[in-house]
Amino acid sequence: MSQLAIKGGPITINRPLGKSWPIYGDLEEQYLSEVLRSGKWWRGAYSDEAVAQSKVACFEQAFAEYQDARYGVAVTNGTQAIECALKALDIKPGDEVIVPAATFVASATAVILVNAIPIIVDIDPATYQISPDAVEAALTERTAGIIPVHYGGYPCDMDRLNAIAQRHGLFVLEDCAHAHGTLYQGRKLGARGDMGAFSLQMGKTLTCGEGGIVLTNDEKLAEKAFSFHHIGRMPGRPFYEFHLVASNLRMTEWQGAITLAQLSRLDEQARTRDANARRLEDGLRDIPGVAPIERVTGLERWNFYFYHWRFIKDEWPEGVTRDVFMEALGAEGVPVHLGHLQPIYQNPLFVERNFGPVAYPAGVEPPDYSAVHCPECERIFREEGISMPHATFLGGTEDMDLVLDAVRKIRENAEELIS
Ligand SMILES: Cc1ncc(COP(=O)(O)O)c(C=O)c1O
C-alpha cells in the first residue's frame, strides 16, 4: 500500500497551517471610522497641525521609527516607492542601476520607468541575495547605484554593498518589500544605505491592500522624496507653489488608517514567524535531501514575505526532482510554491526589450537581456528553491512539526515517487 498522499496514501496535514491573511480587528475599524468622521480623507491642505495628526503622517513617523530610520514618505505602492526614491537620488537618463536576478520584476521595471537601465546580476547561492562580487563585476562608468533586494526578507550583505558604493560614488537603495521587521546587526532595514523602499501590498507582512513607503536618514533626500510624491510641492512652502515635475503618489487616509493599525501587530507577528522558521530550520538540517538557508551572523530576527528553503537534488534517488518533491509536499498538506518562478531577465519584457516610451541619451542602449546568464539564480529557480507563504508561520510551532513530519515521510518513501 502507498504511504505518500500523492500516491493515494494518508494525508499528513488535514487542516490549514498558520493563519489566514490579512489579520485585522477593532483597531482597523476604529481608525477607519475616525477618518470617515473627520471628513479629512487625504493628508491634505489643512493646517500643519492637522496634517501632522493625519493617519498617513502618524504612520510615516511610527514606521520610520520602527525601522530605525529618521524620515518616511508614504506612497501609493511599492513600485512607485522605488521610482520616487530613484528620483530623489537624482537618477539621470541612461544611468545604470544594478539589481539582482532574483526578485519581483518591479525592482527593475521601476528603474526603466525613470529612464535608467537595470543591470541584472547573480545572487549568492548561500543566501539567495545579490552577490557583492557580481555587483563589483558589473560596475561601469555609467553605474549610478545599486538596488539590493532583501529577497524573502533575508538581509543582503549591506556592509560590503555600502563599501562598494562608497568606493565608486554610487547610491544604495534597499528594496525592502519583503523585509518589514527583519532585525540585522541590531537594527532593522531600509535606512542602511541611502534610501529604502517598502511595498504595503496585500500579500506583504505589513499591508493596507495597496501602498508603499520610502525611508531615509537624510533630511534632503526625505524632502525630495516628499516633493516627488506631492506633485512637486515643498514642505513649508505655499500650497500652490511647485518646485519639481512630479506625480501624485500620496497615500489616502484610508490606507494610512489600516497600515497604522496593522503596524501595531507587526512586531509580534515577526517574532512568531521567526520562532517558527527557527523550528523548521532545526528540523530541516536533520533530514537528508533538504536544507534551510543558514542565517548569516547578525541575522537576529528573520521576518519574511516568502520563506525559502532548499531541495538538495544530489541527495535524492534519480528521478526525484524538486518539482516532484513539491507536488508530494502539496499533497501532504504543506503550502509550497515557486515564488517568482524565474530570474527576472527571462520575462518577455526583458527578452524583447519592451521598454515602452523610455528616453535614453543618444548612443546609450540597454543590454541584450536575452544574453544575460546568472547561473546560480537559474539553478536555484530550476531545481533547488522552495518557498512558503509567510502566514503559514503565524501559528504554533506544532505546525512546523507537521511540515517536518511531511518532509520526513516523503524522504522515507521517496522510492514511491519514481514511476
Ligand atoms: C521585491 C519587490 N519589490 C517591489 C515590489 C512592488 O510592490 P507593489 O506591488 O506594492 O508595487 C514587490 C511586490 O511584490 C516586490 O516583491
Image (spheres, helix red, strand yellow):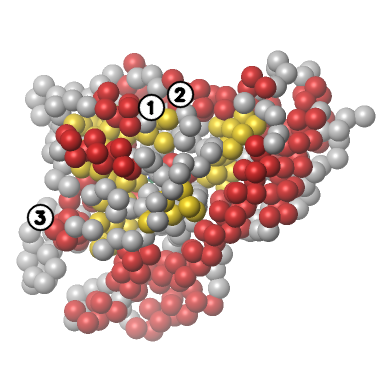
Quadrant of the snapshot with the N terminus: top right
The first of marks 2 and 3 along the sequence is 3
Q: Which mark is residue 244?
A: 3
Apparent side of residue 394 relative to residue 232 in the rendered image (left or right): right
Q: Mark 3 is on which residue type?
A: Leu
Apparent side of residue 174 relative to residue 297 in the rendered image (left or right): left
- In this rendering, the answer to whether 413 lies above or below 86 is above
Q: Nearer the viewer, residue 194 or 159?
A: 159
Residue drawn 65% across the image and 56% down it: 18
- Residue 399 visible (yes or no): yes
Q: Residues within 10 Å of mark 1 (few under 14, many from 20)?
A: many
- In this rendering, the answer to whether 389 lies above or below 342 is below
Q: Mark 2 against mark 3, which lies toward the viewer?
A: 2
Quadrant of the snapshot with the C terminus: top right
Give the image location of residue 330, x and y in percent.
Answer: 70, 38
Q: Mark 1 is on which residue type?
A: Asp
Residue at the spot of label 1: 122
Q: CA distance from mark 1 to mark 2?
A: 7 Å
Q: Which mark is residue 376?
A: 2
Give the image location of residue 289, x and y in percent.
Answer: 67, 28
